Amino acid sequence: MDSEDSSVQRRPSRKSVAFTDEKLVVDADGSVTMVASPTDEIKETAQSHSAPTTTTDAQDAAAAPAADDGLDLSLMKKKKKKVKKDEDAADAADEAAPAEGDGAIDLTMKKKKKKKVAKEDDEFAKKLEALNLEGKEGEEAAPEEDEQDGDMDQGTGIWAHDETKTITYNPLLSRFFALLSQKNPDHASTGTRSYKIPPPQCLREGNKKTIFANLPEICKRMKRADEHVTSYLFAELGTSGSVDGSRRLVIKGRFQQKQIENVLRTYIIEYVTCKTCRSPNTELSKGENRLYFITCNSCGSRRSVQAIKTGFSAQVGKRRKMQG
Amino acid sequence: MSIENLKTYDPFAEADEEDSGQTKQTQEYIHIRIQQRNGRKTLTTVQGIPKKFDAKKILKVVKKEFACNGTIIGDEDSKMGDVIQLQGDQRAKIKDFLTNKDEGLGLDAKTIKVHGF
């Protein structure tokens, strides 16, 4: 997945880095809700995973293209043809399971959601959510698998200490994930929760300058040096600027908050998140011979990152002074 | 007569070569940048188009297709090579063009880096 990430880096559809403002979520029935965290959406996408076993095959077939969907949309035009084909396949799968009305509805909902959620939920999180949900829906699912119920916390039913019946795979797996999230909540939450930084505050100074007010705060949150972030911003925006008395950044040129947000997002993807475990808990340090290294604090991996290069910048405005 | 086995294979040299290959690849990135001009105007610059393509011809096609003007800036002193500069924000279009197999250059999307907001 990471290799594809790098190819579609700069697409707005990618929401792996969210800014703390609440998300507007439009449900399939048209109701609009404000969701503070993306967990709710993920649960809904995961719903189909906990559906009766007969539908899972068809749904899985449909689920894969739907997931592709989110990716491909952000790719090139010519990929669209392929996407359409995939959607057809999904539709076919849809029709293949007409008996389960519930499943069909789930699918359509899911497709819509998928596009919005993009791919912030990695495999692990998805599984976890699905299983959590399964646990909650235990009451409904009970009649189907009547011999496999019981409260694992109280040790009743199949979870009783002296129970001799073999426990099937799924309850065991759900118990594992439930215990995992119970015992170390921070570990379980890293997959689902997207990395959040305070939204950048942009003010206009005069007509041609933008003030980026809360840069120190954001840098503190990302554990990066102000200078590093600043130089990246300047290189990407193709401008220059300075830091004023109260440590605010003054950027030459007009920029909106959204634009700064995009640049920060790419910065985080490139210089903050660990490529191995996707954790933002990393440190940037200058290694030997002028190379910068990112060391992950949660998984211990270490990788080198590219130095910030300004590259070509066209000369704008006044003409360059003639040589000689 | 040569003995195949005696062709020593030096693991370190290999690793080194691979390394340099990688750095070369990173240098081969095509950078698409955007730059602000006065008002709402912008410039798009494309840097690092492979030498096998003729920048002049690309520019001619692109100018017609995107309906914009543009120029080639050759920097002899710096190592950036020819830079195509287009008027307006043509980042998405030029990326499409560079990756399009039928009407464009058919380059790999992974070698293209889009900068800017």
Image (cartoon, coloured by chain):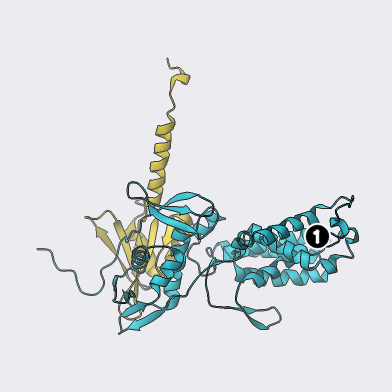
The vertical placement of A244 against A172, above or below, is below
On the question of residue A147 being in view, the answer is: yes
Quadrant where the image shows the N terminus of chain B: top left
Q: Of residues A184 and A24, which is closer to you in this image?
A: A184
B11 vs B61, nearest the viewer: B11
- Residue B105 in sight here: no
Inspect the image, locate mark 1, and give the three-letter code of the amino acid beneath it.
Met
Residue A61 percent location from the top left of the image: 73, 59
User: Chain A colour?
Assistant: cyan
Q: Is residue A147 left or right of residue A46?
A: right
Instruction: Count numbered badges in the picture.
Output: 1
* Left or right: A242 in relation to A172: left
| Residue B73 percent across, percent down from the top left | 27, 62
User: Quarter-wise, where is residue A220 in the image?
Assistant: bottom left
Quadrant of the rendered image containing residue A324: bottom left
Q: Badge 1 is on which residue? A: A152
Q: Indicate the quadrant where residue A177 lies.
A: bottom right
